């Protein structure tokens, strides 16, 4: 049936091909409908009873000169002066497959994908689903969703120099349409390598920090990474200073293999009941804790499963014995409710898919960002480096940049600030004696606090080298005055520093310093050892020499009688030979003549 409507149709036009007007009411049948075409390129479906338009179709670029119902009024066919014939569907169904999507812009790790809206068969497209793959042999995956009003999407997280294919399907109220044909292969741009992810810190020792990171292997010629630059900051060093190490790809792989061997050996040793974890190896600690947690959870779940299984068997036996019991009726009602909830969930999921609320697999449904580990799955390589030559007890940060044949890429995010392990203090310098403080019996000894190596110095040990006596002082003391020393004797000292990690080595001996000397003390009273008619032998105790060797004695005598007492005189010098040693316990024998 065909009709012409002479009156000019008013209303807005939409240049969109195969538009999707609102659906017809279900109570309108073929004998109640009339179609007309006007000069404004529109097709109208009229209600004969009310004389009002039911539907408006637009999509031709020029006047329509013929229109008719087809397929028992389930569709309309129209011809236009624009030399096109269009078919309009009145029965809702899932969208048709879109045309092949195209990439209109690409960078190293992103591509801007565009497509055209397919026929929606009298329903509004609520969403588009996009899938992509690497090359042409892998399966499509990385499912992401975009709203039905958008016809482009930026795909992120791609690998430089890698070929990708894309496909698109549309979703409306009636369901998900078929996938489009795969797009041609598009290769991301080849440039300097992309920044690697933030390196993980391992093996924190007193003088070294280990870092691990991942980098992709080459996918096309010219994109392979050949070297890595590891840059250091901390302890007064800035990244701008350019303190760095350069290693090759093969060296980084070798370091990672060595690290894994060390880690496995220590984990095996711990599992056997001995040994300690690598210092600062948080990943190992978490791994062991996770294993222990999993074992406990598995044991509890296994026990709970066994308990529930026994309870279920018991209830089943009771229900079989008495099918009309209240428990049996309650169990059947519970099973019925469970089945009903399952069906409701399935219906809700189907409705959500029809609205376009599709949960992506491997991507973010809002941003379209796909995780890098998914984008690079299968070609990421684990690498490692142990940065040595660090100072104990200081915070350091590290970052990594990859180098290919094109050049050096951007730096990775820096590691979190990591402090090297403290250790015992370094060996102190030799202590010094304050020369202005030296007397016959005392002297002042001073020393300097050495580098503490990350842990504060809490004590000093000072050793007197002449007798080996060790004195202990807290960290507030850096000098001490020694009393009760012997005059004229040489003294030297050594010092040690200690912190919570231990004590340092003994310092070198200080320069030997002598106490001052003076004249000897007054001798004691001489004693007559032997005598003759004209001679006397005297003994005298050796006096304290005050640090200077006694070289001789002066002896005076005087005559004493009952009538006369003479003055002291007749002085005699008795020399002590240089090789002779006189102890305080020996007597000095003085022989004549006097």
Image (spheres, rainbow, N blue to C red):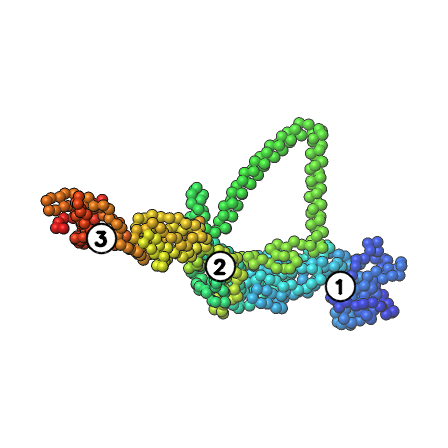
Residue at image position (42%, 59%) is 389
- Disc 1 from disc 2: Cα separation: 62 Å
Residue 443 in which image quadrant: bottom left
Total marks shown come to 3
Q: Which mark is residue 550?
A: 3
Mark yes or no: residue 382 visible: no
Mark yes or no: residue 286 visible: yes
Q: Nearer the viewer, mark 1 or mark 3?
A: 3
Q: Residues within 10 Å of mark 1 (few under 14, many from 20)?
A: many
Point out the tag, 1 or 2, that comes first from the N-terminus: 1
Farthest left residue in view: 533
Across and down, in percent, residue 175 comes to 70, 54
Position of 305 compared to 255: left or right? right
**In front: 317, or 300?**
300
Q: Which mark is residue 19?
A: 1
Q: Please tell me whether mark 3 sits on a helix, a strand or a loop.
A: loop
Q: Which residue is label 2 attached to? A: 396
Point out the tag, 1 or 3, that comes first from the N-terminus: 1
Q: Please tell me whether mark 2 sits on a helix, a strand or a loop.
A: strand
**In front: 521, or 18?**
521
Disc 1 to disc 3: CB gap under 8 Å: no
- Disc 2 from disc 3: Cα separation: 65 Å
Farthest right residue in view: 50
Point out the tag, 2 or 3, that comes first from the N-terminus: 2
């Amino acid at each position: 049936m065909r009709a012409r409507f002479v009156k000019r149709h008013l209303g807005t036009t939409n240049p969109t091909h195969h538009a999707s007007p609102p659906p017809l009411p279900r109570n309108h049948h073929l004998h109640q409908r009339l179609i007309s075409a006007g000069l404004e390129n529109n097709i109208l479906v009229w209600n004969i009873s009310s004389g009002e338009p039911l539907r408006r179709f637009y999509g031709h670029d020029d006047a329509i000169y013929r229109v008719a119902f087809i397929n028992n009024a389930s569709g309309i066919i129209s011809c236009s002066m624009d030399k096109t014939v269009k078919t309009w569907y009145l029965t809702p169904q899932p969208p048709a497959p879109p045309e092949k999507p195209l990439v209109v812009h690409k960078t190293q790790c992103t591509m801007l994908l565009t497509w055209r809206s397919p026929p929606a068969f009298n329903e509004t497209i609520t969403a588009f689903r996009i899938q992509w793959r690497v090359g042409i042999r892998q399966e499509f995956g990385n499912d992401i969703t975009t709203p039905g009003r958008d016809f482009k999407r930026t795909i992120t997280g791609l690998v430089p120099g890698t070929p990708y294919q894309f496909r698109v399907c549309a979703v409306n109220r009636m369901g998900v349409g078929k996938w489009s044909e795969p797009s041609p292969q598009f290769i991301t741009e080849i440039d300097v390598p992309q920044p690697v992810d933030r390196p993980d810190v391992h093996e924190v020792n007193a003088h070294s920090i280990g870092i691990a990171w991942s980098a992709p292997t080459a996918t096309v010629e010219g994109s392979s990474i050949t070297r890595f630059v590891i840059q250091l900051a901390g302890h007064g060093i800035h990244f701008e200073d350019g303190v760095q190490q350069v290693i090759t790809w093969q060296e980084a792989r070798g370091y990672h293999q060595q690290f894994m061997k060390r880690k496995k050996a220590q984990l095996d040793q711990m599992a056997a009941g001995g040994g300690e974890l690598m210092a600062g190896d948080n990943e190992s600690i978490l791994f062991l804790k996770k294993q222990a947690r999993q074992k406990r959870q598995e044991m509890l779940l296994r026990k709970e499963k066994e308990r529930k299984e026994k309870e279920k068997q018991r209830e089943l036996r009771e229900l079989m014995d008495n099918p009309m019991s209240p428990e049996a009726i309650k169990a059947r009602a519970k099973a019925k409710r469970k089945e009903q909830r399952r069906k409701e969930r399935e219906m809700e999921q189907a409705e959500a898919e029809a609205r376009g609320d599709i949960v992506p697999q491997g991507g973010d449904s809002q941003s379209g960002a796909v995780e890098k580990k998914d984008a690079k799955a299968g070609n990421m390589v684990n690498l490692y480096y142990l940065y040595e030559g660090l100072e104990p007890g200081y915070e350091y940060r590290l970052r990594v940049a990859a180098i290919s044949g094109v050049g050096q890429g951007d730096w990775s995010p820096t590691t979190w600030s990591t402090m090297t392990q403290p250790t015992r203090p370094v060996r102190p310098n030799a202590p010094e004696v304050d020369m202005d403080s030296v007397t016959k019996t005392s002297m002042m000894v001073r020393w300097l606090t050495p580098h503490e190596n990350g842990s504060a110095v809490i004590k000093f040990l000072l050793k007197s080298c002449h007798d080996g006596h060790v004195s202990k002082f807290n960290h507030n003391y850096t000098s001490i005055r020694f009393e009760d020393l012997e005059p004229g004797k040489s003294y030297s000292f050594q010092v040690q520093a200690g912190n919570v990690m231990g004590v340092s080595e003994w310092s070198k001996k200080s320069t030997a310093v002598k106490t001052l000397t003076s004249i000897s003390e007054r001798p004691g009273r001489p004693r007559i050892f032997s005598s003759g008619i004209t001679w006397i032998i005297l003994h005298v105790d050796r006096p304290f020499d005050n640090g200077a060797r006694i070289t001789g004695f002066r002896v005076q005598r005087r005559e004493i009688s009952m009538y006369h007492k003479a003055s002291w005189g007749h002085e005699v010098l008795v020399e002590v030979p240089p090789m002779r040693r006189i102890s305080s316990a020996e007597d000095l024998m003085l022989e004549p003549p006097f």
